[in-house]
Amino acid sequence: MEGKIEKTLFVLNELRKFLRVEVALVIVCMSLSGYFIFHSLGNVIFPLVFASFFLSCAGYSFNHFTDKEEDIINNEKLNFFVTHRSGKCITFSCVFLTVFSLFYLPFISFSICLTALILSVIYSAYRIKNVFPFKNIYSGLVMSMSFLMGAGINWEGFYNALGYFPLIFIIGMTGNLLGDVRGYKGDKIAGVKTIPVVFGISFAKKLIVFNFIVFTILTLSLGYYLLLPIVPSLVFVCVFIMKGDYIKARISMISTFLLLAPFLFIIKLAGF
């Protein structure tokens, strides 16, 4: 009995890693943040959540199949679902569920999500990460599109969100850079030219701190105060990454939009 429980827990944990569920939740909250800032509460939230979640799961699970060399170095083994035949079925199911959810979204959100899905596939299939320094810009752009997807329920929301987009892009790009710092060893051995590999870990850490300072200054100067709840998490990211505690830095990074979306939801309910 204990053996079955342990096996089940192992498979569930591998599935979480395969789909990067925690990152998918960040993408969902990023979409919801774009929605809550510019729109009233409505039923479109549900397909938006499903589309965002499965979009992220599809992209990250597919990426596992093209990042085998780096993953086996960093993790000392491949994910269970990369080696098991069910892995490709899960990835295909995520793609299908993303496309299915799209048809319940307005045209602008539909178009943005479909574009993000295509770009995610291109990223892995054509190894965009090997193109320095385009990789971080590309990844940050794709991730940040989820914010526009939430805001793009109508044209007014989409246009208003464009002013916020550079700030969201900074968060998305820098979060990707943090992942490169964590994956430095595998990327270097595999010959992948990420910013930490080319310029060194120290430079990458300083760049992360610099980006977050720029984000905070721009948020205040532009008057986008609804994004300020992100700042405390960014402070913790900077503290932990300079200490070399990448696990806590990652947790802090994940908490950014996981805290922002509920905050925006509460003030929306309060009528602000």
Image: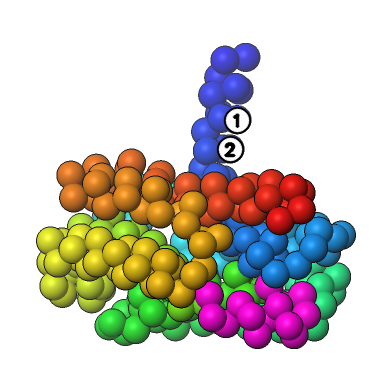
In the image shown, does 272 or 12 lie closer to the viewer?
Answer: 272
Q: Taking 1 as reference, is 59 above or below it?
A: below
Q: Which mark is residue 116?
A: none
**Magenta-colored stretch includes residue 163:** yes
Q: Quadrant of residue 27?
A: bottom right
Segment colored magenta:
151-164
Q: Find residue 219 and report its horizontal and vertical position in percent.
A: 43, 68
Q: Is residue 40 visible?
A: yes
Q: Find residue 141 and report its horizontal and vertical position in percent.
A: 48, 78
Q: Taking 119 as reference, is 31 above or below it?
A: above
In the image shown, does 199 or 66 lie closer to the viewer?
Answer: 199
Q: Quadrant of residue 31?
A: bottom right
For numbered disc 1, what is the local secondary structure?
A: helix
Quarter placement of the N terminus? top right
**Magenta-colored stretch includes residue 185:** no
Mark 1: amino acid: Thr
Residue 119 placement, left or right of 114: left
Q: Quadrant of residue 213?
A: bottom left
How was the colour assigned to the protein in this rendering? rainbow
What's the residue at 60%, 22% (across, down)?
Answer: 5
Residue furthest toward the top? Answer: 1
What's the residue at 60%, 30% (across, down)?
Answer: 8
Give the residue at mark 2.
Answer: 12
Q: Find residue 57 and report its horizontal and vertical position in percent.
A: 60, 59
Q: Residues within 10 Å of mark 1 (few under 14, many from 20)?
A: few
Residue 236 placement, left or right of 197: right
Q: Is residue 90 visible?
A: no
In the image shown, does 139 or 191 lie closer to the viewer?
Answer: 139
CA separation in Å, label 1 and label 2 = 6 Å
Mark 2: amino acid: Leu
Give the residue at mark 1.
Answer: 8
Say whether marks 1 and 2 touch (CB < 8 Å).
Answer: yes
